[in-house]
Image (cartoon, grey):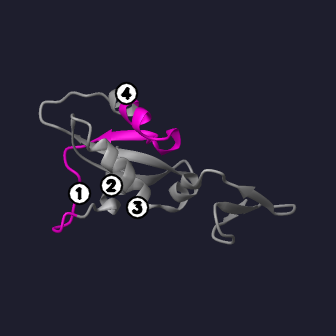
Amino acid sequence: MTVLPGLFKGATIVVTPETGPAEILDIIERHRVTVLFGAPALFQEIEKVLINHPDVGDCAVAGIPVDGKNIIVAFVVLSANETNSVEQLNTYLAHELPSAKVPQRYQLIEEIPRNPNGKILRQKLFELYTME
């Protein structure tokens, strides 16, 4: 099966199976498409909500390829002396965001990789995720 993004306006994806005619799949929820192809605006929206949690000192969100598909992964630095669990963070985000925008996985790390200007180095996040 081959996915051909960008052929139509909106949130439509064309899937061509190995045999047989092409199928057109209309994705109703636009954010599902943005996760597939990477969307900094989507990641920033999730980060803005997550950073407002009192136990979160810093965070970054990225689309990470896992088992052939991209999933949303939240990288979280907890505030000093916090022992918050991933389940608590997930519950918080589930109350604040639509279900499709809640990260599928979380990774607690010591520091968010940033360049000297403070921009998140998402490639480093990919490397951190694959190390776990």
Foreground: disc 4 or disc 3? 3
As for residue 107 lying within the magenta part, the answer is: yes
Q: CA distance from mark 4 to mark 3?
A: 25 Å
Q: CA distance from mark 4 to mark 1?
A: 24 Å
* Tags 1 and 3 touching, CB below 8 Å: no
Of the two numbered discs 4 and 1 on the same chain, state the one appearing first in sequence: 4
Query: 10 Å neighbourhood of mark 2: few (<14), some, or many (≥20)?
Result: many
* Tags 2 and 1 touching, CB below 8 Å: yes
Residue indicated by mark 4 = 87
Foreground: disc 4 or disc 2? 4
As for residue 103 lying within the magenta part, the answer is: yes
| Residue under the image location 12 percent in, 35 percent down | 80
Residue indicated by mark 3 = 40
Q: CA distance from mark 1 to mark 3?
A: 16 Å
| Residue under the image location 17 percent in, 30 percent down | 82
Of the two numbered discs 4 and 3 on the same chain, state the one appearing first in sequence: 3
Say what amino acid the circle numbered 4 marks: Glu
Q: Secondary structure at mark 1?
A: loop
Label annotation for residue 113:
1
Query: 10 Å neighbourhood of mark 4: few (<14), some, or many (≥20)?
Result: few
Residue indicated by mark 2 = 125
Which quadrant holds residue 95? top left
Image x and y of residue 77, in percent: 22, 42
Tell me which segment is drawn in magenta: 91-118
